[in-house]
């Protein structure tokens, strides 16, 4: 699931960068590595908590709701502090640094949106599909 979210965010961020006119540079190229790191962290936290809730006997949907209620605040807080840190770069007089700040803030925001909205449903859907398939 991490690969899906990383690929989606990198593709989406690259498209957004193109649409708003941010050129590819050595700094904006590094954004992909940053996205991989942050996205992996968020997904490990989410899936780890989800699996823990399932081990306690909850059904997949209930486990995800509980997992999000317990770990969601930490993910949002981490994303907001990261957004703030990279957001400072947007005020730079250097275009290269400013573009990097914009691109990274955009990428981190997309990671947050995908982690909180898209991935939970996808994880639950896949888990339920797998359970049905194995029970046949």
Image (cartoon, grey):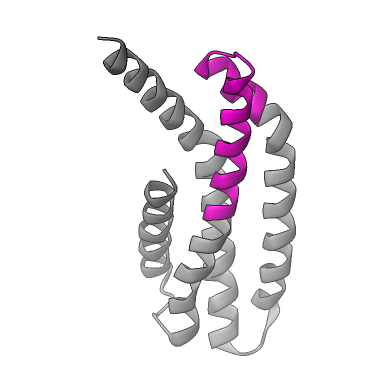
Residue at the spot 48% in from the left edge and 77% down from the top edge: 30
Q: Indicate whether 51 appears above or below 1.
A: above
Task: Please provide percent x and percent y for residue 106.
Answer: 54, 61
Left/right placement of residue 86 relative to residue 129 reads right
For the N terminus, the quadrant is top left
Quarter of the image for residue 48 reads: top right
- Looking at the rendered structure, the number of numbered marks drawn on it comes to 0
Q: Nearer the viewer, residue 110 or 3?
A: 3
Q: Position of residue 70 (x, y in %)?
A: 73, 31
Span of residues in magenta: 40-67
Q: Is residue 25 left or right of residue 84?
A: left
Q: Residue at x 57, y 21 (%)?
A: 54
Residue 109 highlighted magenta (yes or no)? no
**Residue placed furthest toward the left:** 136
Vertical relation: 86 (above or below) 75? below
Which residue is located at x 64 percent, y 18 percent?
56
Q: Report the quarter where the C terminus lies.
A: top left
Q: Position of residue 114 (x, y in %)?
A: 50, 43
Relative side of 76 to 128, left or right: right
Residue projecting furthest to the bottom: 94
Magenta span: helix, strand or loop, mainly?
Answer: helix
Question: Residue visible at 36% across and 69% down?
Answer: 18
Q: Please tell me whether residue 66 belongs to the stretch shown in magenta.
A: yes
Q: Is residue 91 above or below residue 80?
A: below
The residue lying toward the viewer, choosing from 73 and 45, is: 45
């Amino acid at each position: 699931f991490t690969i899906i979210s990383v690929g989606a965010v990198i593709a989406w961020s690259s498209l957004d960068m193109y649409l708003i006119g941010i050129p590819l540079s050595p700094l904006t190229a590094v954004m992909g590595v940053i996205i991989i790191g942050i996205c992996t962290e968020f997904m490990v936290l989410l899936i780890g908590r989800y699996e823990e809730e399932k081990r306690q006997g909850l059904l997949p949907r209930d486990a995800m709701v509980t997992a999000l209620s317990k770990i969601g605040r930490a993910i949002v807080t981490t994303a907001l502090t990261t957004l703030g840190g990279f957001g400072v770069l947007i005020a730079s007089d250097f275009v290269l640094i400013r573009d990097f700040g914009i691109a990274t803030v955009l990428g981190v925001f997309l990671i947050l949106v995908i982690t909180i909205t898209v991935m939970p449903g996808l994880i639950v859907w896949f888990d339920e599909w797998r359970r049905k398939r194995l029970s046949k």
